[in-house]
Amino acid sequence: MMIVSPKASPETRLDDNNSQATTDAKPFFQKSLDASPYPHLFTPLDLGFTTLKNRVVMGSMHTGLEDRFYNYGKLAAYFAERAKGGVAMMITGGISPNREGWLLPAGGTMNSKLDVINHQRVTRAVHKFDSKIIMQILHSGRYGYHPFVVSASAIKSPISPFKPRKMSIKNIEQTIDDFARAAKLAKQAGYDGVEIMGSEGYLLNQFLSRHVNKRDDEFGGDIFGRMKLAVEVVKAVRAAVGVDFIILFRLSMIDLVKDGNTMDEVIATAKALEAAGVTILNTGIGWHEARVPTIVTSVPRAAFTDFTAAVKNAVNIPVMAANRINMPETAEQILIEGQADLIQMARPFLADPNWVNKAQQGEAHRINTCIACNQACLDHTFENKRSTCLVNPQACYETELVYKPTKRPKKVAVVGGGVAGMSAAHVAALRGHDVTLFEARDSLGGQFNYAKVIPGKEEFFETIRYFINELASLNVDIQLNTTVDKAMLNDSGFDHVIVATGVVPRSLKDTLEGAELPQVMSYAELLSGQKAVGGTVAVIGAGGIGFDVSEYLTTRHAKPLNEIGAKQLNDPSYRPQAQSVASWREEWGVTCDPDYQSAGGLVTPDAITPARQVYLIQRSKGRLGRGLNKTSGWVHRAHIKSHGVIQVSGVHYEKITNEGLWITNAQGQSQLLRVDSIVVCAGQESVADLMPNVGDAPSAQYHLIGGAKLAAELDAKRAIRDGAEVAAGI
C-alpha cells in the first residue's frame, strides 16, 4: 500500500532575497524528527512494500563503465563505495533496452541473461551496505551516436550527426515490450527497481513534446496522445515486475526548448504516470540541446525546485527534487518547505562518496563539495572517456587509485598551498605520513583564490574550505607566509619533497611596447584587487582565463578580493553572495512562474547593462572560446555575448600607449582600441626553482606536480590528480 502525501496549498513564491523557491506544501514523514542536524533529510520514507532509510538518492550518471562487461567489477566498487557512504538509493547510468536506444555503438544494455550476470556484481556489492540500487532504462532516441537512431518524428537533433527514422506503430509496440523485458531482467539481476528516463530530451521526452513530436496518429497530437508511449511503457513495466518493485519516472518539469510543454501538460502527464503505476516521480530539467544552462556552476543552488513543488502538489506519490543541490542545508530546506519528498544528487556523490554519513554525523564542513564544473564528469562522457571528478580523482577509479595506509611513515614536505599541494598533503597525511605544507602567502588556495571571485564560480570557495578542514583534521603542519629554499629543505630531514609551487601569469613587458604602463595589469593583479580598471577594458588572451575575466568585468555583482576582506577570505565558513534565482532566470529567459503557460517555460530574457565595455582579443583567427570545455563553454560564450563583450580575433599587438592598445586587425590595418585599462591573460609560467639541478645530490626524493610541472591553460583537474597520485605512491 502506497502511503499518500497530504495535500498542500498550491501557493508558491520565488523569493529573490533567499535565492530559493518556497511553498506551503508538506512532505510526508512517517517518524518523529530527532536531534539530527538535518532531521527531515534523515527521516525514512515508507513506500508500503519497502522503506528508504533516508531521503537522499544518488542520481544517474553515465560513467563509461556501464558500456563494457569487463568494467563491471570497477562499476560495482564505485557503487559500493557510495552505498557504504550512507545513501538510501542509487540510480545507475543509462542502460538501453535495445540496440536502437544505444547512446553509443555497443552501449550498455539489459536485454539478455548474459547482461543479468554482469549486473548482479553491482547489485550484490550495493546490498551489502543496506542501500537500494535502481537501474535506469534509457532509450536515447534521436540523441544516439549511431546510425540506428529513431524518434517520434524524423527530425535531426543538434547534438548527433545522425538523422532519426520516424518510429512506426509496430516499432513503438516492440519498444514498449523491450522496456518491459529490460525491467524484468533488472529484477532478476537483483535491482530494487528501475528508473524510466523520460526527460533531458531522450526518446520518451521526444514523444512528450511538440518540439520533436509532429505525429498525427494516436502517439501524437495533444498531450494525451504525446504521453501515450510513456504511459504504455510504465504499464508494461509494472505488469512485468509486479507490485513490490520500485518504478521511478524521470519527468521533465520544464523543457526549456521551443515548443516545449507547459506546466498544465507536465501535470497531466504526471497524473497519468501515477495512475499507470509509477512509485516515485523524479525531476528532470531542460533538454541537452536547450540554450539555458541547468547544472553548470553558475546556476544558483536549487534553482528549479518550485517546478518540482508544482508537480508534487498535483500528485499523491513521492516526488524527488534535483539539479544544483550539493550541500545538506540546501537539501534540508527543500524538505522543510515541502517542495519535495526526496532529494536527488548525482555529481555530489562523485565528489564525496561519504556525503550522507558526514551530513548525518554533523560534519557537513568536511564534505568535498561538487563545484559543478563538469570538467571530469560530463565533459569526459561527451568525449567517450571514463568519468571521474575534478575534486575527487578517486571517483570511478576506486580499484586503481587506492590510498593505502603506509607501513613506514615518512617525513614529507609539500611546497605550495594551491589545489595541487593541498591534494598531495591531504592524501599523504591520510595515509599516515608526517606532512608539513609550506605556503608563501597568507592563505591557502592558490589560483582557486582568483577563480572563486568570478561571478558564478562561488562554489570554488567550497573546495578550499574542504581542504583546509581536512588538513586540520589530519594534523598537517601548515606554515603560511613561509618562503623556503633548497638549503632549508635539505637541512630539515625530509624524506620526500613535493614541489607544488604553481604558476605566475606571463608578462608581456619584454615583448610588447608599453606593457609596463600603470594601466596594464595581470589577471592576478585584477582579481586580487591590487589594481583597478576603468570603464573600458581590453583583455589580451581569449582562453578560459580571458573569458572568466571578461565575465568578471561585465557582471555587476562581482567583487575583488580586497573588497571581500582578508578575514572573510581566510574563514573556511565564509560564502559570498551568489546571483539570486530570480535574477538568474530573468537573465536567461526562464519563467519565474511555477505554473507557467509559456511553451517550455521560456520567456524573453531581460536586457543586460554591463558594468563596463570590454574587448576580448586573441591572436589566432576564428571563433573565440574554441578551447573551452564542451558542456560549459557555450555558457561562457553566451554570457559574454549577452554582456556586450566585443570579440576580436586574428590580431597582432603593436604597442600600448596612454591612448589605449594599438593592434593590427585581421584585415592588416592598424587600429587603436581606446581603452582605459588592459588586462593580460596570455598564459602562465611554471615556478619550479626548487627542483634539483643536474649534479645536485638532495637528501630527499623530489616530485613535481600541478602547474609547476606543466603551465598550460590552468588545469585544476590535472593538478589535484597529480597531487593525489604522487602522494598515493610515496
Image (cartoon, rainbow, N blue to C red):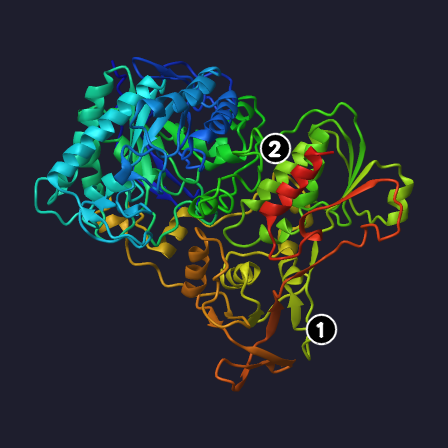
- Is disc 2 placed on a helix, strand or loop? loop
In the picture, measured across the screen, residue 653 lies left or right of residue 27, that is right
- In the image, residue 282 sits, relative to residue 574, either above or below, namely above
User: Observer-nearest residue: 356 or 435?
Assistant: 435
Gap in angstroms between the C-alphas marked 1 and 2: 43 Å
**Which picture quadrant has residue 88?**
top left
Q: Which residue is mark 2?
A: 401
Q: In the image, residue 294 lies at what x, y percent? A: 39, 46
Among all residues in the image, which is located at the extreme bottom? 669
Closest to the observer, 170 or 670: 170
* Lateral position of residue 85 relative to residue 17, left or right: right
Q: Badge 1: few (under 14), some or many (20 or more) residues near its Cα, within 10 Å?
A: few
Graded by Cα atoms within 10 Å as few (under 14), some (14 to 19) or many (20 or more), the crowding at tag 2 reads some
Q: Using the image as rendered, state which of residue 309 and residue 434 is in the foreground.
A: 434
Could you say whether the residue bearing mark 1 is in a helix, strand or loop? loop
* Mark toward the start of the polypeptide (1 vs 2): 2
Query: Visible in this render: residue 95?
Result: yes
The kind of residue tagged 2 is Leu
Q: Looking at the picture, how far across and down is residue 675, in whole percent?
A: 56, 77
**Quadrant the C terminus occupies:** top right
Residue 511, above or below 87: below
Work out which quarter of the rendered image holds the N terminus and state it.
Answer: top left
Q: Position of residue 296 (x, y in %)?
A: 45, 47
Q: Position of residue 267 (x, y in %)?
A: 21, 36
Q: Is residue 95 left or right of residue 42?
A: left
Inspect this view and state whether residue 326 appears: no
| Residue for point 68% across, 64% down | 506
**Nearer the camera: disc 1 or disc 2:** 2
Residue plotted at (45% across, 63% down)? 640
Q: Which residue is mark 1?
A: 509
Q: Amino acid at mark 1?
A: Lys
Q: Is residue 556 above or below residue 327?
A: below
